[in-house]
Image: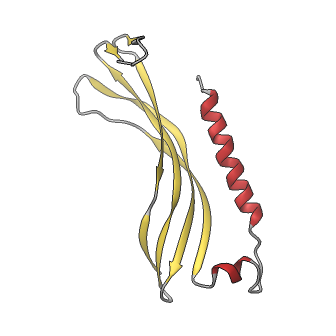
Amino acid sequence: MKCSVRYFSALYKIAAVAVILMLATRINAQKKGIYDLLGPDLTIGVHFDPVISWFGSDIDSVSNDGARPGFNLGITVHRYFGSNYALSTGLNYISAGGRLVSANQTIFDITTGIDPVVPANSSITYKIQYLSIPIGLKLQ
């Protein structure tokens, strides 16, 4: 499996930010520190989720050729406006992908002038990374 250096450098940066965020917060039984700053109506959390993703196609000559592991890393914020209700938002970084195989030869049109050609029935691995900003209503 070939992995690019850029992928791992981004992964290390995200992991470093997550560790800094976890070390920067303290958990206290008393109301002091960050609790006074945020107030009782605001909570912040950090999450890391494993992801298994795959692609499908609506073209008959292209089919799924397997799933790829990935991850979802993010920060969530809940703003309570009642004892059982909160507005929820955050920021997530998702790394996912999949493999597709085509019965026909595939030519990628790249602007650098070199257009790679993938032979028929060869698997192509796609990697995607994106940010999401979820917005929701939390009911307890």
Give me the residue at 40% from left, 12% from top: 113
Image quarter of the N terminus: top right
Give me the residue at 68% from left, 52% from top: 17
In the rendering, at what x and y percent does residue 111 appear? 39, 19
In the rendering, at what x and y percent does residue 138 appear? 45, 75
Residue 9 occupies which quadrant of the picture? top right
In the rendering, at what x and y percent does residue 23 appear? 77, 62
Q: Above or below — where is 127 with respect to 79?
A: above
Which residue is more in the foreground, 60 or 43? 43
Q: Above or below — where is 13 with respect to 81?
A: above
Which residue is more in the foreground, 24 or 112? 112
In the rendering, at what x and y percent does residue 136 appear? 41, 69
Answer with left or right where residue 124 lies relative to residue 104.
Answer: right
Give me the residue at 70% from left, 60% from top: 21
Give me the residue at 76% from left, 64% from top: 24
Answer with left or right where residue 7 lies relative to residue 139.
Answer: right
Q: Above or below — where is 42 with respect to 52?
A: below
